[in-house]
Amino acid sequence: MTPTHFVFSSMFMLGLAGLAFHRTHLLSALLCLEGMMLSLFIALSLWTLQLNSISFSASPMLLLAFSACEASAGLALLVATARTHGTDRLQSLNLLQC
């Protein structure tokens, strides 16, 4: 495993660990998801550059577009949660309550 692959794998695993173990606020969960998407974007961009293939050149931009859509949906949910519940703590959200 090259050092570049190790760094991006570590970035992804740190984001995943932060998402799994530090789930107190919705904003921190969204930031962990963004860190994971950023590491995937950079790794996919470097992989495309190493292959020197034109057919894979649209993949990083497609991932970046989906990441932007995910971020906007997450922020909309954060605002809606903060308005209705008054906080973004994940423990205060009850999925069984309408």
Image (cartoon, rainbow, N blue to C red):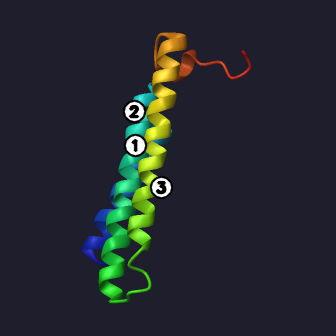
Residue drawn 48% across the image and 10% down it: 86
- Residue matched to label 1: 32
92, above or below 39, in the image? above
Mark 2 vs 1: CB contact within 8 A: yes
> Could you say whether the residue bearing mark 1 is in a helix, strand or loop?
helix
Query: In the figure, residue 95 lies in which quadrant?
Result: top right
Q: Earlier in the sequence, mark 2 or mark 3?
A: 2
Q: CA distance from mark 2 to mark 3?
A: 19 Å
Query: In the figure, residue 18 lies in which quadrant?
Result: top left
- Residue matched to label 2: 28
Q: Residue furthest left?
A: 3
> Could you say whether the residue bearing mark 2 is in a helix, strand or loop?
helix
62, above or below 74, in the image? below
Residue drawn 44% across the image and 85% down it: 55
Residue 66 is marked as: 3
**Residue 36, position as x, y percentages in the image:** 40, 53
Foreground residue among 66 and 46 = 66
Query: In the figure, residue 13 lies in which quadrant?
Result: bottom left
Residue type highlighted by circle 3 = Phe
Q: Earlier in the sequence, mark 1 or mark 3?
A: 1
Residue 43 is marked as: none
